[in-house]
Image (cartoon, rainbow, N blue to C red):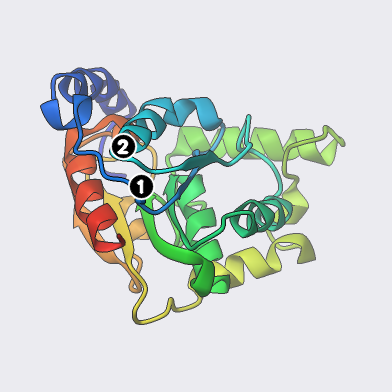
Amino acid sequence: MGAPLYAELRYWPELAGLMADGRFRSPAREPRRPPVLLIPGFMAGDASLTLLASWLRRRGHTVRLSGIRLNAGCAGRELIRLEQVLADFDEPAIVIGQSRGGTFARALAARHADAVAAIVMLGSPVLDPLAVSPGVLRTIRSVARLGDLGIPGVFSSQCRDGDCCTDYYTLLRAPLDEEAVAVMIYSRSDAIVDWRACLDPSATCVEIDGSHCGMAVNARVYAELERVLELAH
């Protein structure tokens, strides 16, 4: 892994830096910017992307949240549900996903290229969703045991190799359209995800210095998002 777990405490100075950034507080607003779908990371919900959603709306984007309260469900079933969310847009949408949410964004883009204007993946281990720190891997196994016991709303151990998630894993490996706007933002000092698992060959990979949990509150990420959002306009 790139850094010890305590490095994730950088979230708080990253958040403070974003709050002090004038481009975040007062972004340039234009009408008719493309809509955006936001997908949160593992064990997180839509509330974790509140600041990002607010910034996007101030820029003039229509923002739709994923409807995820706790991102710990079966990936195959969640992908099917997100496909319906994507289908509800009236035009191609930009899909931004953090961590596990970014793997869903990539799967959506691989299957529905015509419905996705661009994707941005924030610290997403698309090459190997289990390339995570030992502590997070223990959490994943604990959640899977709950799923094995029949607890609703969480994945089970069968999701790893079962038919339910076959399409999901296939789409993570599938090449994206050559004209697709796809960006992966990663950090070598990510203490949660192995940064090497983020190096999607179908995406433009942009390295930042920051924590994994702070990807959605890092000013450097927002500067890159501005570039991508204008490119997809």
Circle 2: element type: helix
Mark-to-mark CA distance, 2 and 1? 6 Å
Please name the residue shown 67% across and 33% down the image. Answer: 142
Please name the residue shown 50% across and 35% down the image. Answer: 136
Dot 1: within a 10 Å radius of its alpha carbon, few (fewer than 14), some, or many (20 or more) residues? many
Left or right of 147 in this view: 192: left
Left or right of 74 in this view: 186: left
Depth check: 181 or 100 in front? Answer: 181
Left or right of 187 in this view: 167: right
Q: Disc number at residue 122?
A: 1
Depth check: 208 or 49 in front? Answer: 49
For the C terminus, give its image quadrant: bottom left
Q: Tell me residue 13's x, y (percent).
A: 19, 19
Q: Tell me residue 2's x, y (percent).
A: 26, 43
Q: Which residue is mark 2?
A: 215
Q: Is the Cβ of the residue at disc 2 closer than 8 Å to that at disc 1?
A: yes
Q: Is residue 42 visible?
A: yes
Rendered image quadrant of residue 190: top left
Q: Is residue 44 visible?
A: no
Residue 164, placed above or below residue 50: below
For the N terminus, give its image quadrant: top left
Q: Residue furthest bottom?
A: 178
Left or right of 156 in this view: 32: left
Rendered image quadrant of residue 168: bottom right
Q: Amino acid at mark 1?
A: Leu
N-terminal of the pair, mark 2 or mark 1, is 1
Depth check: 130 or 19 in front? Answer: 19
Circle 1: element type: strand
Please name the residue shown 56% across and 70% down the image. Answer: 112
Q: Amino acid at mark 2?
A: Met
